[in-house]
Image (cartoon, grey):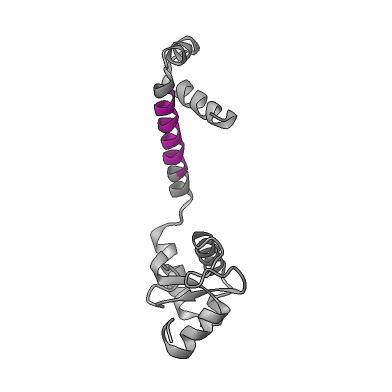
Amino acid sequence: MEENDFFKVQRFITRLAATEQEALEIVRGLGRVNWHVLYASAHQQEHVEGIQSKRARRKPAEERDARIQELRAMPYGDYLQTPEWQETRRLALLRATFRCQTCNKSKELNVHHRTYERLGRERQGDIIVLCDGCHELFHKNGKLAK
């Protein structure tokens, strides 16, 4: 177990235990298998706290909806310059491990909209990462095969 993992479990135990002595007793009573179960619980707790923190920072629904309407009303070229699209594009490239999802090339990549239906709030299936060659082929033929 890495040092960071140890500290994650330690923080979790500290939250569970009422006193430092109780925390020490929990640690002493752990076997190898239980330690991993506790690590998984600590990791899950950390994940839940991250989600709760993200929700606390989230904008109110009316504000989000107004921004989506604004994004959908702007010219497409302007939309591609927005921070929302830049983040969507970055996540798509990460999911595709910076490779074309058709031919696996890793250079000259485009993030292509398969649909414009949810512009400003794209789902993973709404976009695809393509190299220049595959992107050109798609626009030329309307599909990715000849």
Q: Residue furthest bottom?
A: 140
What residue is rendered at 59% in x and 28% in y? Answer: 3
Q: Nearer the viewer, residue 77 or 43?
A: 43
Please tell me whether the stretch drawn in magenta is mainly helix, strand or loop. Answer: helix
Q: Nearer the viewer, residue 142 or 83?
A: 142
Number of marks: 0
- Location of residue 101 in the rendering, given as x and y in whole percent from the top left corner: 48, 69
Furthest-right residue in this view:
107
- Please, is residue 58 above or below residue 42 in the view? below
Does residue 36 show up magenta in the picture? Answer: yes
Q: Residue 91: x, y in percent?
A: 51, 61
Q: Position of residue 126 (x, y in %)?
A: 40, 71
The magenta segment: 35-50
Foreground pick, 84 / 112: 112
Up the image or down, 25 lies above or below 33; here it is: above
- Is residue 37 rendered magenta in the image? yes
Please provide percent x and percent y for residue 18.
Answer: 43, 15
Residue 36 or residue 70, whichever sits in front: 36
Residue at 44% across, 10% down: 25
Q: Residue at x 43, y 45 (%)?
A: 51
Q: Is residue 6 left or right of residue 107?
A: left
* Residue at horizontal 39 percent and vertical 68 percent from the top: 125
Say which quarter of the image contains residue 47.
top left
Give the position of the C terminus as an image quadrant: bottom left
Q: Is residue 4 above or below residue 102?
A: above
- Hey, which quadrant is residue 113 in on the image? bottom left
Q: Is residue 4 visible?
A: yes
Q: Is residue 123 visible?
A: no
